[in-house]
Amino acid sequence: MKGLAIVVCAMAAVSAVSVAIATNGMNMIGYDAVSAGLGGADVAIETGCTAVASNPANLTTMAKQSFAANVSLLSPRLSFKNSTMSGVNDMDGEVQVFPLPFIGYGARIGGSGVTWGLAFFAQGGMGVDFQDVRTNFGTRDDIYSNVRYMRLAPTVAYELTDKLALGATLHVGYSDIAYKFFPETSYYDPGADGAPMTADDMVFPGQELAGAGGMGYAARIGLRYEISPELALGASYSTKANLTYEDGDLDMNFSSMGLGKVRYEGEVEGFSWPAAAEIGAAFKLLDAHLILSTELQWIGWSSALETVTVTGKSPNNAYAPATVEIPFAFNWDDQFVFAFGACYSVSENGKIRGGWNYGKSPIPDKNVYPLFPATIEHHLSLGYGHTFGHMTVDLTYEHGVENEVTNPNADPMTNPFGPDDTTTHAQNTLHMTVSYRI
């Protein structure tokens, strides 16, 4: 049993929770067309009820009421190269499109200076889908992963003075995970002693996890200060959300040991959404026809993604190991993100936007795998918004510039795809927001 646990950890750990790919690590750069059109530099921008997803203090900039509905269609472009004992992989991932919604409402409470809001939105989500991949075991099999993380965010904001406002948000989130790591492949070697179930056994069970999900809770506070009608400052801080994924079906392929596929109750622990802090400014120029916005953000990945443990319990085969435990080190770095955006009024009702967002990948090269290539560093965006009375329609195209990373890690215990496996990641996202304000 001990030998089995060691090998499963070494060869399957990177697959077990490597499922969430977004933009700044696992976070989207913007949650609606306006924010994304500014490259995510929205912490000091007047955005109506969509402020619930960025800086809650900006809710106080609404006149009376605001409603917004957004859908973002995110499509990654992934490719992968490596050498195996059965040949070379040089392949593109399957085309995937992930719909990421936002719906929100905000309203002032009379003349009290209090504004409240409520929003439901996708915090982040993506995945990979590589089919017919060559393995080291002479088979061709699939790699698939997907994560979704949704948040419900009740919010309240208060104007302390005509210049200073504070806001607070409670994040009630739900996330689920699914993955496949060579599910039809099974390998077993009893080792030099020829005896089964001893410490020198070499075992690779293909895996598939489905239906594992859990709740996570966090809070965000925000501040807005208007130095003048032309200059506003904004800042916010979000706490970490600890997530435990439970009630999953974890299938382990022990066919090479004569056990077939064994189903376990699957759990994932130690996978968190990180704390984050941001500060920025918005400048109104040319009689407010031109707005420039900047933002600096810190994301605390190092304390959110350290050691993650995947556990399988209660197998449906009495001859299978009673528990499969897969601990591994993720070891992400903290990330600093810089964003810059510009908005120009081309007419009384029309606005164009452009943005740039940069954040060095938080994943060390030695930890980059085809199951989790969240490596994009540069994002460019272009958008347009048009107002029809009380209603505004905004569209934004966001491009994650292609980034290629080669993993130098030659240790098969921590990099079963290498050494020198190369992952390439680019991304396109289309945002559309319809908002109504009075």
Image (cartoon, grey):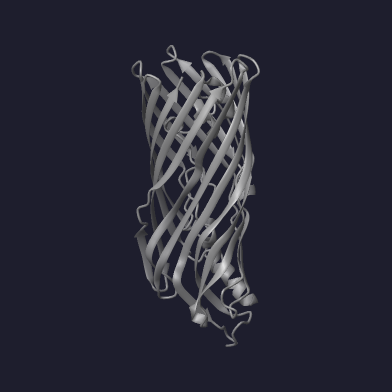
Quarter of the image for residue 151 reads: top right
The percent position of residue 316, horizontal first and vertical second, equals: 56, 74
Residue 54 visible in image: no
The percent position of residue 299, horizontal first and vertical second, equals: 58, 41
Q: Is residue 431 left or right of residue 158?
A: left
The percent position of residue 162, horizontal first and vertical second, equals: 61, 14
User: With respect to residue 357, does 62 lie above or below?
Assistant: above
What residue appears at the point 49 percent right and 52 percent down from the top-left corner? 147
User: With respect to residue 173, does 250 lie above or below?
Assistant: below
Question: Image quadrant for the N terminus?
Answer: bottom right
What residue appears at the point 60 percent right and 39 percent down from the top-left corner? 171
Q: Is residue 82 left or right of residue 328?
A: left
User: With respect to residue 292, does 242 lie above or below?
Assistant: below
The percent position of residue 98, horizontal first and vertical second, equals: 41, 47
Residue 138 visible in image: yes
User: In this view of the protein, which residue sits in the foreground, 157 or 361?
Assistant: 157
What residue appears at the point 47 percent right and 29 percent down from the top-left corner? 340
Q: Is residue 186 left or right of residue 60?
A: left
